[in-house]
Every structure is written in C-alpha cells, then in structure tokens.
Image: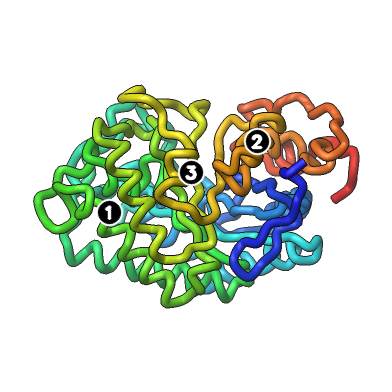
Amino acid sequence: MKLFEPVAIGPYTAKNRIVLAPMTRSRASEGRMPNALMAEYYAQRADAGLMISEATSISEQGLGWNDSPGIYTETQAQAWRQITDAVHAKGGLIFLQLWHCGRASHTSFHPELGLPVAPSAIKINEDYLHTPNGKQAYETPRELAADEIKLIVKDYQNAARRALSAGFDGVEIHAANGYLLDEFLQSKSNQRTDRYGGSVENRTRFLLEVVEAVLQIWDSEQTGVRLSPNGAFNDMGSHDFREQFLYTAGQLMQYDLAYLHIMDGLEFGFHGLGEPMTLAEFKKVYPGIIIGNTGYTLELAEQRLQARDADLIAFGRPFIANPDLVYRFQHQLPLNPDADMADWYAPEGAKGYTDFPMLRTV
C-alpha cells in the first residue's frame, strides 16, 4: 500500500505516509510546561512517518485552552527537549505547531492583558468556553491595531526560534479552526478596512507575514501551514471560502514549504456554505506536498494517496486509543475501542492518554 511507502518531506524521509495529527490533550504541567508524561505519549506514537505536536501557544496573549503547553519562555523550550529526545530515540520526526487562539479565548487566561484579540470586534456566537474559572461566556474581542499585528508576527518568530532550540524537526503554523490566523483569513470574522482586511489578498497578508518571519529561523522545507477551508469550529465559515482558500494556497506555494496541511474532512464540523473543498482542488494550485486530515479510514487514506490528491494523511482520533496505529494498519489488526471523550482532556494524567493496550511496543 502507498500509505506505508516512505516520502520526502524537505530534508527528511518519512518512513511512511501516516501523520500523527496535532491534538490538544491538556496534560501540560503548571506554567504550561511540557513534561515526562507527554514525552511518553509522543514516544508511543513515534512509528508515524511524521508527528505534529499539539497546538502550542506562542505567547500569553495567545492562550485559550486549559493545561495546553507553551513555547513563549526559554524554560518551556528546554522542557520540550524531553519530548523531542524521546521521539528521536524512537526514530521519529516531530514538528511543533505554533498557535495563537485569538478571539477563541477569555480574559481569565490572561487577566493582565485584558480582552482576547481578533481582526475585528466580533464575538464567537457559541454558548461558552472552558476557562481557568470554569465555563464562561465568550467575550467580544478587542480589534488589533496594525502595529500590534507586527508584534504578534514577532511572537511567532520568537516561538519558532525556541522550537529550533528545543530540538524539533520543523514547525507548523496553525492557520485553521477559527484561531487568530484563520480569523484574519475569513470574511466572517475579518471586517477590517485597512491593509489586513477587505480583499482576499489583504486577508492573507498576516499569514504570509508570519510565514516570512518564521522562514528567517527555519528553512522553508522545515515549515508547514495548516488550513481548514470547510470547518465550522469556533463559529467559522465564510461565503467566499473557496476563493479565499484557493488564493491563500496559491500564495503559499511560492515559499517551497515542507507541506500544506488541509482539514478537508467534514467530521469536525462543516459550515455548509457551498460544496466542500477537496484535496484535488488544492492540488491544482498547490502541487507541493499536501497532508489530508479529518475522518480518514485506512481505505479512504489509500484512495486519496493513489489518486495523488494527497501525499500523506493525518490521523487523529484513531491515534488516541491506538498508540501502535501504524503497526495495526500494516497488519490489518483490529483497533482498540474509541477512547472515552471524557478522558481526552482529563487532568488525572495517564488515564485515556498513555494507558491504552498495544499489540506492539513502540
């Protein structure tokens, strides 16, 4: 099967085309610190051709999820070393996902900084989010000034530099799922009239500035970008989504990136504003390496690879309950029952995280 063939990703050769999708698991220690339990989790799954870390905050302002890790201090970067060392000891490759939550946050995550920030002062139209103080209603975010955007670009660059010192093999810029960069891309959440809003070109500007800043630290072939053109998570979905995302993908092609990571599947939610975008559409404007994601089975993954619509496929939920997913796929072995969703973000540690039975020790 093509899924088990090696593939070049920039300077690396992935041993197969299976990607560990980035999944927030909320196991970081106090101070957003990576820890030994997280190292065990990633090492268990290091048979993947490529691993993408859980979303990792680039700044205090970017926080928006309980117990997620950070990469905005040198101490956090040093703590990530235990994860990268554990993965490399198993022969794995791991990229760090760079994250700013934007309006999908709350003042209680950063009380000294005040309201969450966004391209425009438009509140997420959902009931509540989980905060350090329990469930709270979404707030109307503060619109970023143009000079503040430049500072956030610098935050991305500094986080990328720390990821390099932490021993990662590359970085992924998270521009999906209704977080800050996605909020700038989409007309639903970006109603600015300056150079960062109004047209598809202007709405893409912030992302491209972040890419260019990160590329001052990392080689382009060690840098990826994630998009979610079909997604409704965090109250997203714009009527001009197809025009926006095809333009964005075409612009990203000029940078010779390691890959473009596209959440094309609909299982994470679909905005329903037109026909879903497909990987085949993206391949026409982005002929480089594409990772497909969301809701993939072994069979569907193989179909996408054989059709050359994608070069790798990311798996999320199956990897939660099956640390040895690659081995099970290779030998057509049954998968463990799905993990209890109540344990996905459980604070008690190993339960629902590193305690799943394995048919092969990895």
Sequence-first disc among 1 and 2: 1
Label 2 sits on a secondary structure element that is helix
Report the amino acid beneath label 2.
Ala
Answer whether residue 39 is visible to the viewer in this image. no
Left or right: residue 71 compared with residue 34: left
Asked whether disc 1 touches disc 2, contact meaning CB atoms under 8 Å apart, the reply is no
- Front in this rendered view, residue 328 or 249: 249
The residue positioned 62% from the left and 27% from the top of the image is: 341
Rendered location of residue 311, percent (x, y): 61, 48
- Disc nearest the viewer among 1 and 2: 2
Label 3 sits on a secondary structure element that is strand
The residue positioned 70% from the left and 39% from the top of the image is: 319
Looking at the picture, does residue 315 appear above or below residue 362?
above
Q: Which residue is mark 1?
A: 204
Q: Which residue is mark 2?
A: 301
Badge 1 density bin: few <14, some 14–19, many ≥20, Cα 10 Å: many
